[in-house]
Image (cartoon, grey):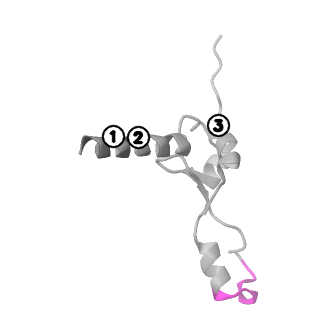
Amino acid sequence: MRTTHKPNKSYKKRVKVTATGKVVYQQANRRHLLSGRTGDQLRRYARPGVLDETQAKPIRALIGKAGKNPTKVAYLKEQARRKAEAEK
């Protein structure tokens, strides 16, 4: 009998994996008690957070997107750029 991986639905709802494999999430501290925070803080919290690769790899595995790897994508882009330069 073959088993399949069940993705963790709670993480799937909380994070998004970009096309290159980066894991982005909505930052905390943006729900209530906002009058005590500066405008700079509120603008910073409004931006999506990006997980560090050491934390992102297990999260991608949990939600079934383990095949995406931003380090590999960056490497392939660099290889293509070098190849294009060599052909010039």
Classify residue 86 as left or right of residue 16: left
Q: Quadrant of the C terminus?
A: top left
Q: Whole-percent x and y of residue 56?
A: 65, 47
Measuring 50% from the left and 51% from the top, which residue is drawn there? 18
How far apart marks 3 and 1 lie (CA) works out to 32 Å
**On the image, which quarter does residue 64 sit in?**
top right
Instruction: Please state which amino acid type lies under the numbered disc 3.
Output: Ala
Contact, CB < 8 Å: mark 2 with mark 1? yes
Q: Secondary structure at mark 2?
A: helix
**Which span is picked out in magenta?**
32-39
Residue 8 in view of the camera: no
Q: Which residue is mark 2?
A: 79
Measuring 62% from the left and 51% from the top, which residue is drawn there? 13
State which mark lies toward you, 2 or 3.
2
How far apart marks 2 and 3 lie (CA) works out to 26 Å
Q: Residue furthest left?
A: 88
Q: Whole-percent x and y of residue 39?
A: 64, 87
Instruction: Please state which amino acid type lies under the numbered disc 2.
Output: Gln
Q: Whole-percent x and y of residue 58?
A: 69, 40
Residue 83 is tagged as: 1
Q: Which residue is mark 3?
A: 61
Residue 80 in view of the camera: yes
Classify residue 69 as left or right of residue 57: left
Q: Name the foreground residue: 47 vs 54.
A: 54
